[in-house]
Amino acid sequence: MLDYAFRQLKQLKDEFDPSRAALGRWLAIVSVSIVIVAVGGVSLYAVDMLHDQADAQGKSRALLIGASAREELRRVDENTLAAAIAEYVQSPQRRAFLASLMNNRLGADFGDRQGAAVRLLPYRVFASAPVDEFTSVHSAALADGHSAVQRIPRLDLYAASFPIFTSNGDVIALLEARLPAAEIDKATSQLVRRLSLTALVLGLIAVLGGMVLGELVAGPLRALTRAALRLGEGDFSTSIPPRGPAEVGVLARTMEDMRRNLVDLTGTLRRHEAEAQAVLAGIVEGVYAVDKNRVIRYLNPQAAKLLGVRADEAVGRFCGDVLKPQLQNGRRPCEINCPILHARLEGRAQSVEHLRRGEDETRTTVITSSGMAEGLQVQVIRDETELEAVRRARDSVLANISHEFRTPLAAQLASIELLREGLNTMPLEQQHELVLSLERGTLRLTRLIDNLLESVRIESGQLGIRRQSLALPELAEDARALIGALLVQRNQTLDVAIPEELPPIEGDGPRLTQVFVNLIANASKFAPEGSALRVGAEARGSQIAAWVEDEGPGLPAGEGASIFDRFRRGSDMEPEPGGLGLGLWIVKSIVERHGGTIVATRTPENRTRFTITLPMETLA
């Protein structure tokens, strides 16, 4: 039973929870309660006063009736009255005389008093009679010596008692006046009903007023609440209605100002965010931010691409699990040499990290870490894998250039020393051989320098093409003249089989001559000593196809297109060291700028053929 009672009390408390009730309902309830308490209190007080006044009026009327009756009795001769009372006591037959006396004296005055009754009670009869409802009022009158009045609820009447004294002060009788209370109570009941009706009407008016007041106050507040909920959800488009009472209107205008400020601030923040996103998306470096636990909270697209992950998958993970740096002495750098932790102590830190991407790929990166700010720490990660490769290629090229320049220069220096020592004694044939050696070394250095300069011009976009009519046989002969000394050195021959009637082409003569020089020099380097090199050409529609063939071992498998890359060298197949890996790349660049193509193939005769295709000269 106690548990059930507690549950009922809790349910009742929840039903009347102020936080769950509407403001308009509470205003109506409070207003009605105040009116009910006020009207009820006034009504109760008024009813109590009415009852008091009615009771006083009833007692006064009863006293008035009794006093009037006593005055009438005073006009009766005292001896006659005393004798009649004595005979009444001794002989009940004398009661008719006493009644006649009362009727003659009092009937004329009280016959018209509706409901009022007066009787004369001998004192000896009262003294010997048993106690009844009137005993107390008579006793009070005797004690007062003048009069007494009381309301007797059981009989619903007012009773007044007046003692009748003889001239010597003895009590001979009690004059009793009775007045029914119904008439007085009727008037009081009418007033009470009127008061109740008035209270009811006022209560209804209070209910209506409370509802109107609640709507006047709660309506604008509900609108403000809906607007505040929209603001909380991020909807700043709908304005806040400035209506309602003065205080609510001030609140609405304040919220409207706040909304406009939020709109302006949100717009500014979104612009700044868009600018920051544009900057972070536009920079080459990757950017990521971590919290105090080194958990990634932001990752820009460049960093995600560099690490080979998706940004939404990386966010929320430990940075070491996403970056996957190579182990150092069997431990991760995150545990022993983390730039993020160093930056928290020093304000800034930088380190080179080798990050594993997949099973076999490793990226060389430079990670720059800033200090902690607002609970976040920003790192900039720069991929230097290609730059590292370029550095290695640069070092290799510089080493090759040094070697390529040192070898012919050493040979030339040796030839010059021999010429100087045997200038007057050395036979002319030996002197001629030394001069040819100097010429070959000079040609080789010139070709190397030309290729270097040409590569610089191509890389910087300064390779200009002059358009003029050119005959292909002349270009081949110019190339033979420039490369002849190298062919003599290797005891190789150059067979040029280009038809004289071949249509001319349009292009830059010196650069196309360089194309043939580079192709013939490349063929000479890979072809055996004493072999023959071949240059041919033919017309193919609106184009001219020219080729250079050698009897070398051919192209490595799968490297048909890569041999034209910059700094690409086939050191494993070269019969002699040398070359910068620029010759074929320069050839491809010059041919493509002339609108042509170049391919490397193997002929049915097991010869290596480099074929260039150039457009014929167009007639104006």
Image: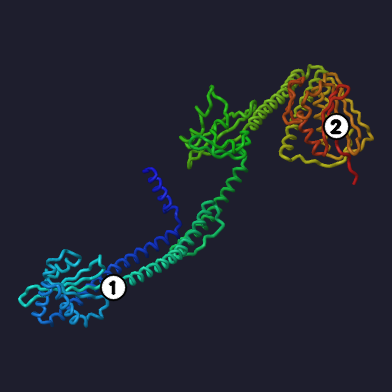
Crowding at dot 2, Cα within 10 Å, few <14 / some 14-19 / many 20+, comes out as: some
Relative to the observer, which residue lies in front, 486 or 175?
Answer: 175
Residue lying farthest right? 501
Residue 415 shown left or right of residue 199 in the figure = right
Kind of residue sitting beneath label 1: Ile
Q: Are circles 2 and 1 on residues that touch, CB within 8 Å?
A: no
Relative to the observer, which residue lies in front, 596 or 233?
Answer: 233
Residue lying farthest left? 168
Residue 378, placed above or below residue 160: above
Q: Quadrant of residue 537?
A: top right
Residue 467 shown left or right of residue 179 in the figure = right
Q: Which mark is residue 478?
A: 2
Q: Quadrant of the N terminus?
A: top left
Q: Which mark is residue 184?
A: 1
Q: Say what secondary structure mark 2 lies in.
A: helix
Location of residue 369 in the rendering, given as x and y in whole percent from the top left corner: 52, 36
Name which residue lies at 20% across and 75% down: 118
Residue 292 shown left or right of residue 365 in the figure = left
Location of residue 51 in the rendering, given as x and y in whole percent from the top left corner: 27, 69
Mark toward the start of the polypeptide (2 vs 1):
1
Relative to the observer, which residue lies in front, 489 or 560?
Answer: 560
Crowding at dot 1, Cα within 10 Å, few <14 / some 14-19 / many 20+, comes out as: some
Relative to the observer, which residue lies in front, 368 or 592?
Answer: 368
